[in-house]
Image (tube, rainbow, N blue to C red):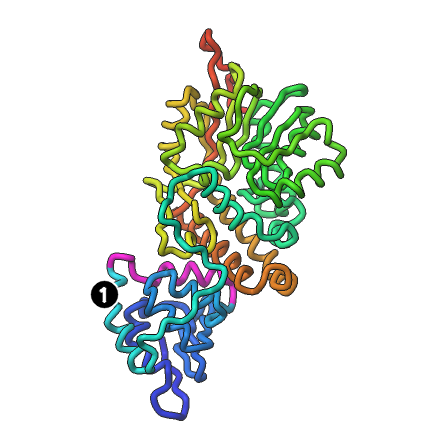
Amino acid sequence: MALLIRSHANPVAQTLRPMLSALLAADAAVDIEFWDGSALRADSPAGAIRVHSPRALQHIIWSPRELGLARAYVSGDVDFDGDIIDLMAELRTSSPQRASLMRTFPEMLRAVNALGLAGRRPPLPQIEFRPHVLRNHTPFLDAQAISHHYDVSNDFYAMVLGESLVYSCAYFPDHGTDLTTAQLAKCELICTKLGLQPGMRVLDVGCGWGTMVMHAASAHGVDVVGITISREQAALARQRVAAAGLGRRVEIRLQDYRDLRGETFDAISSIGMSEHVGSANLETYFRILRAALRPQGRLLNHAISSIGGSRLRTNTFMYRYVFPDGELIDVARTQAAMQAAGFEVRDVQSLREHYALTLRHWVRNLEQNWEAAVAEVGEQRARVWRLYMAGSSVGFSDGGLNLHQVLGVVPGSDGHSGMPLARPV
């Protein structure tokens, strides 16, 4: 990086260069501009970080890892210019690994001291989620976490998700497919794997705003129950079902999966739900769903995964601002839990690249509707969504995250699965 110096002495860029050299690779393709007009310039930048205020450095010194930079961005003390996904990818590539990050702390502290900023902790963004002492998945705590993320504003989600109003990975037959078509293609992919036939009774766990249940009912002639613990989702889903004339086939319930008792279904879809269940509760989750399926009934579990699994630490951006209950589970662990519950695993498919592309669409939608989104939920929350979706897209692109659909079946007493001999899709 080249240093651009203003005419006055001791520009901020000069003071911070040792610290930034410790934090970023020498060839990092990122411009960094500071509040006094000085800057560090890259040869071919992927984008620019604009530091508007000394408070940004205070956030970083108090939380030297990702959370500090995220707080600075959410607070408006830092901006990312250019394609934010490309910029996030460059920062991930050029930043040190977590194990070596703390070695840069002395440089950070010297820089902050030189600017007279040490010892002052800036106010935290108002929308930050405060960690619970207990992190177990009780119905009460799960409801709080779900409300924090989903009961934001249905209008805001419509701006981000687009016409389909689906908040999970889409399925793109090709790169030219638009988002709405790709989301309906995902719903159809799941219906095909479940082998839906007219007259079947289907359960969708974590039904969101109802797109999957509406598609299954209208395209396959099935009766569907959708359950969610988000009040705002349930209210809008019921409105959409009524407007589509599907009230006789679709029922939307405000219901926890743990309250499913004494009902039988022919097929179950669980889309973006098991991430909220937690690894410790996974076998229980699948046992409850297994008990609700008739013999030869199928379950399709569609969920984000990571190698070895990971539970969000409380000092991370994703925990504090996005998914307080989030836990990514290794796909092998998911399969083992399904088998322990009595399912026979019949198919596993990765849609990793599809989620990276889905997130690009969502980021673009948010940016195109930025002023309306800020008016609806406030600038801090809009910034949270832009940052988390961009970072997640990078995670799916580089393989740190994955999305797997796992299909399980309940074999009959005679061992027959009812599955076709050939994979249908």
Can you give x and y, in whole percent of width and height, for residue 93 in the image? 36, 59
Q: Give the class, few, some or many, for how many residues have Cα within 10 Å of label 1's Cα (few <14, many ≥20).
A: few
The quarter of the image holding the C terminus is top right
- Of residue 184 and residue 377, the one placed in the foreground of this image is 377
Majority secondary structure of magenta residues? helix
The quarter of the image holding the N terminus is bottom left
Can you give x and y, in whole percent of width and height, for residue 376 in the image? 63, 60
Q: Quadrant of residue 92?
A: bottom left
Q: Is residue 16 above or below residue 352?
A: below
| Numbered circles on residues, count | 1
Identified at 47% across, 76% down, the residue is 52
Look at the image and tell me whether residue 32 can be seen. Answer: yes
Identified at 64% across, 38% down, the residue is 211
Q: Residue furthest top?
A: 414
Instruction: Name the side, left or right, on which 77 lies relative to 66.
Output: right
- Of residue 119 and residue 250, the one placed in the foreground of this image is 119
Q: Is residue 314 above or below residue 412?
A: below
Instruction: Name the side, left or right, on which 95 lies relative to 383.
Output: left
Instruction: Name the side, left or right, on which 103 lies relative to 129.
Output: left
Look at the image and tell me whether residue 420 can be seen. Answer: no
User: Was residue 292 drawn as part of the magenta stretch in this picture?
Assistant: no
Can you give x and y, in whole percent of width and height, for residue 225 in the image? 62, 29
Residue, disc 1:
103
Instruction: Name the side, left or right, on which 214 lies relative to 146.
Output: right
User: Was residue 90 drawn as part of the magenta stretch in this picture?
Assistant: yes
What range is drawn magenta here? Answer: 82-99
Identified at 41% across, 89% down, the residue is 6
- Of residue 305 and residue 155, the one placed in the foreground of this image is 155
In the rendered structure, which amino acid carries the disc numbered 1? Arg
Can you give x and y, in whole percent of width and height, for residue 169 in the image? 53, 43
